[in-house]
Amino acid sequence: MLDRCVAANCSNVADPSRRIFVHTIPFFGDSRLEAIKRRKKWVDFVKMKRAKWEPTKYSALCSKHFTAEDYVFQYAMVPGNSKPSVPRLKRDNVGILAFPTIQAAVVDKSVSQSERTKRKV
């Protein structure tokens, strides 16, 4: 199911309070040529860092892999909330037009573990 980002070094889940949104990789099962090309760009983005990964219809990427320019902000107000509703990726007549472009940074956990060991002494 759509709940966790499939990009390498990223395991974000949807968390609107932190402005993290999860987007299913579009065009699953769509046989239109343009749709196939667009889906391939999303899949190739993930495969740059995860060569053996294979997408499913539930595969998704989080908003941390997109730029602010990839979004359209619809200012429909939710009752009791002063902020606009969830931003949507840009679309055209084929479907989603935006592509992921930002890879997650690798976190070096060995440094924090050694610092913890020092504190324990």
Image (cartoon, rainbow, N blue to C red):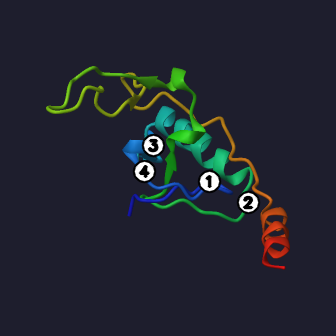
| Label located before the other in sequence (1 or 4) | 1
The N terminus, quarter of image:
bottom left
| Label located before the other in sequence (3 or 1) | 1
Circle on res. 103: none
Residue in view at x 14 percent, y 32 percent: 79
Q: Quadrant of residue 82?
A: top left
Above or below, 53 relative to 74: below
Q: Nearer the viewer, mark 4 or mark 2?
A: 2
Residue type, mark 4 in image? Phe
85 horizontally vs 114: left or right: left
Farthest-out residue, bottom:
121
Mark 1: secondary structure: loop
Mark 2: secondary structure: loop
Circle on res. 51: 2
Q: Badge 3, how many Cα within 10 Å: few under 14, some, many 20+?
A: few
Measured Cα–Cα span from mark 4 to mark 2: 20 Å
Mark 4: secondary structure: loop
**Where residue 96 sits: x, y (%)?**
43, 32
Q: Badge 2, how many Cα within 10 Å: few under 14, some, many 20+?
A: few
The C terminus, quarter of image:
bottom right
**Where residue 117 sits: x, y (%)?**
82, 75
Residue type, mark 1 in image? Ala
Circle on res. 7: 1
> Can you identify the residue that label 3 sits on?
18
Q: Badge 1, how many Cα within 10 Å: few under 14, some, many 20+?
A: many
Q: Tell me, yes or no, whether the two marked residues, 1 and 4, touch with CB atoms within 8 Å.
A: no
